[in-house]
Image (cartoon, rainbow, N blue to C red):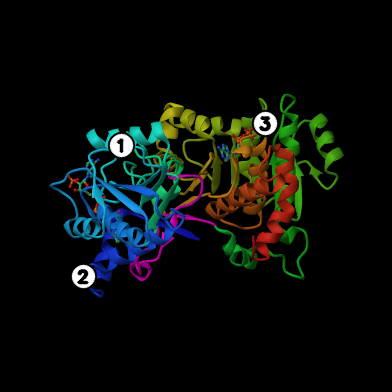
Amino acid sequence: MLRAHSVQAVRDAEAALMERTADGELMRRAARGLADALDDVPAGELLLVLVGPGNNGGDALFAAVHLLDRGVRVDLCLLDPDSVHAGGLDAATTAGARVVEAPGGHRWVLDGVLGIGARPGLRDRAAQWAEWIDERGPVVVSVDVPSGVGVDDGTVPGPHVAADRVVTFGTHKVASLVDPAASVGGVGLPLLVDIGLAPHLPDPVVEAIEDADGTTWAARLHPQAQTHKYGRGVVGIAAGSQLYAGAAHLCVAGAQAGPVGMLRFVGSEALSERVVDRAPEVVVGRGRVQAWVVGPGAGDDVGGRLADAWDDGVPVVVDAGALEHLPATVPCPALLTPHAGELAAMLDVERDDVEAAPLEHARRAAERWQATVLLKGRRTLVVGPDGPARVNVSGTPWLATAGAGDVLAGLAGSLLAAGLEPLDAGSLAAFWHGRAAEAANPGGPIVASDVAAALPRTIARFLGGGS
Ligand SMILES: NC(=O)C1=CN([C@@H]2O[C@H](COP(=O)(O)OP(=O)(O)OC[C@H]3O[C@@H](n4cnc5c(N)ncnc54)[C@H](OP(=O)(O)O)[C@@H]3O)[C@@H](O)[C@H]2O)[C@@H](O)CC1
Ligand SMILES: Nc1ncnc2c1ncn2[C@@H]1O[C@H](COP(=O)(O)OP(=O)(O)O)[C@@H](O)[C@H]1O
């Protein structure tokens, strides 16, 4: 798992580690790793370092010394000449860096304005630098986090640096993984430089499944040799309506790609017939199940379907229209799967509010309903009423396509029925769903059916322990 820690946890770990290391050693390690991550800056190129008042600026200044050694030319812009890492400034200027008043024609920028000590939102000169970056579009590498983001909550409440990539130290920060902050750090994940913090870090506040985790999940999901179909779990699906018949097919396809041994479908007679025509393995009508999926493409009967599902006393995936019928507290373990608009309606706030602070709103809903909330988006979040949040780092923007959520709900239901807890079922479903979308048509458009079709191979590859 990728792990992200709070600023306080990082500071505590740093303090513990510093007792065992020489003065300045951590910054030396950070600066070395940072300079290595900049090995694509050509010798002779002019790099602008934006230097803030704290240790984040110190890291950037010491990294500049390594770059100067390699023949890169370096200009420094100081946010406040009276408040700058003195040792770093001395080392960088001695090695040949020039202090300049303002950014000019620079094509490479190292953003060392603010790190984990930031109050989010840049002001004054720092805000002007961020504006210059937006206008001129140099290649920007941010030190630890893009300056100006909310490090502990992943928000972007004001002017900030938009980076092409981020080099972070010791552990990921919440802002490295959670949107909207993660999305201002470039397309990929931050590069993590090991500075020796790991043994001193507590449990993470946010974690993310990776391909390398496959074997761990395989041990929990592979059917035993002696098992029978009921032993693998049965999932019940109440999805689709006359208007959204396709949602039934897509939800069934998602569930069939998962680990269960059988699917039961409930819906109108006409819809049930269509479902069985396409998926002859599906059994129509209620019966014993280990989990329910209720809501994808649902019609007017969805409130009753959800009530029936609760009556069975098993875990329930509550999706789409069913989210409007949530009781004050959920009577069984539940995985609620809204997108931002649906979560806004659940919490009676605006969609923009949810998109500006998705982690906070997902947590609020998880607390209110005492359930696990899977908030869909570029970086889907899965959050329980307590414990670490999971964030999904697989996927492609092409996954923002009609019906993709129906496939995801079915897959999550299948994992719940196979015995996973809602947090695990939701986060694993989101991870596979994203990987399947990437595999379905690398770099190009996809439809939800493609994602469902790519899932079985994606899952097999993952459980086999590789990408
Ligand atoms: N911890 C570790 O393990 C390691 C940490 N390392 C590095 O240290 C970095 C953290 O350094 P840091 O603590 O000095 O904080 P940093 O973000 O540089 O600046 C704080 C200063 O900025 C100011 N300020 C704040 N917000 C502002 C705003 N909006 N606009 C303007 N000013 C603002 C703030 O002022 P104040 O809030 O006190 O008024 C304070 O003066 C970390 O990200 C990493 O790069 C590595 O070396 C290796 C190990
Ligand atoms: N920008 C994006 N990048 C990657 N994945 C996205 C993006 N936007 C949405 N998604 C994913 O696409 C799916 C859309 O689901 P949803 O909104 O429920 O669609 P539908 O209701 O049509 O099925 C979710 O899995 C969501 O996480």
Report whether residue 325 is seen. yes
Among numbered discs 3 and 1, the one appearing first in the sequence: 1
Magenta region includes residue 385: no
Image position of 203 with respect to 249: above or below: below
Indicate which label's residue lies in the foreground, 2 or 3.
2
- Left/right of residue 430 with respect to residue 231 in the rendered view: left
Among numbered discs 2 and 3, the one appearing first in the sequence: 2
Q: Residue tagged by mark 1? A: 129
Question: In this view of the protein, which residue sits in the foreground, 340 or 272?
Answer: 340
Q: Amino acid at mark 1?
A: Trp
Indicate which label's residue lies in the foreground, 3 or 1.
1
Question: In this view of the protein, which residue sits in the foreground, 400 or 126?
Answer: 126
Indicate which label's residue lies in the foreground, 2 or 1.
1
Q: Amino acid at mark 2?
A: Asp
Q: Residue at x 58, y 64 (%)?
A: 212
Q: Residue at x 72, y 45 (%)?
A: 452
Q: Amino acid at mark 3?
A: Gly
Q: Secondary structure at mark 2?
A: loop
Image position of 331 with respect to 463: above or below: above
Q: Residue at x 39, y 66 (%)?
A: 194
How far apart, in angstroms, are the residues tagged by discs 2 and 3?
A: 60 Å
Q: Secondary structure at mark 1?
A: helix
Callout 3 environment at 10 Å: few (<14), some (14 to 19), or many (20+)?
many
Residue 297's disc number: 3
Report whether residue 307 is seen. no
- Left/right of residue 282 with respect to residue 28 in the rendered view: right
